[in-house]
Image (cartoon, helix red, strand yellow):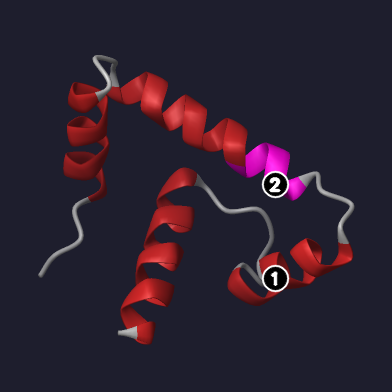
Amino acid sequence: MIFDIEKIIKTIAAQENSTSENVNEEIQKAIDIAWSSENQQEIENQKKLFPNGKPTVEEFLLTIHDAIKSKD
């Protein structure tokens, strides 16, 4: 199965009666909030998942997708 980020974002946008741009913005806001955490456990978890630093929306979704798939 191919993981099509744009298709998923468009589906979410349609379900939320929104736009793809708005969905991307909201996901980016969530990433920014999480990345500004001062909680040491959260920081360590982020470093494990994203060793190259704060991810883009696409990097975030792909990494989370891969992490979930590896637990199946």
Tag 2 secondary structure: helix
Residue 23 position within the rendered picture, expressed as x and y whole percent measured from the top left:
38, 27
Q: Quadrant of the C terminus?
A: bottom left
Q: Which class describes the residues within 10 Å of circle 1: few (<14), some (14-19), or many (20+)? A: few
Q: Nearer the viewer, residue 12 or 62?
A: 12
The three-letter code of the residue at mark 2 reads: Ala
Residue 55 got which mark? Answer: none
Give the side of residue 55 with respect to residue 20, left or right.
right
Tag 1 secondary structure: helix
Point out the stretch of residues depicted in magenta: 31-35
Placement of 68 over or under 24, stated as above or below: below
Residue 64 position within the rendered picture, expressed as x and y whole percent measured from the top left:
44, 64
Q: Which of 52 and 45 is in front in this view?
A: 45
Placement of 10 over or under 60, stated as above or below: above
Task: Give me the residue at 86% from left, 57% from top.
Answer: 39
Residue 34 got which mark? Answer: 2
Residue 20 position within the rendered picture, expressed as x and y whole percent measured from the top left:
29, 25
Is the magenta region chiefly helix, strand or loop? Answer: helix
Give the side of residue 33 with respect to residue 31, left or right.
right
The three-letter code of the residue at mark 1 reads: Asn
State how far apart marks 1 and 2 are (Cα): 11 Å
Which residue lies under the disc numbered 1? Answer: 45
Give the side of residue 21 with respect to residue 44, left or right.
left
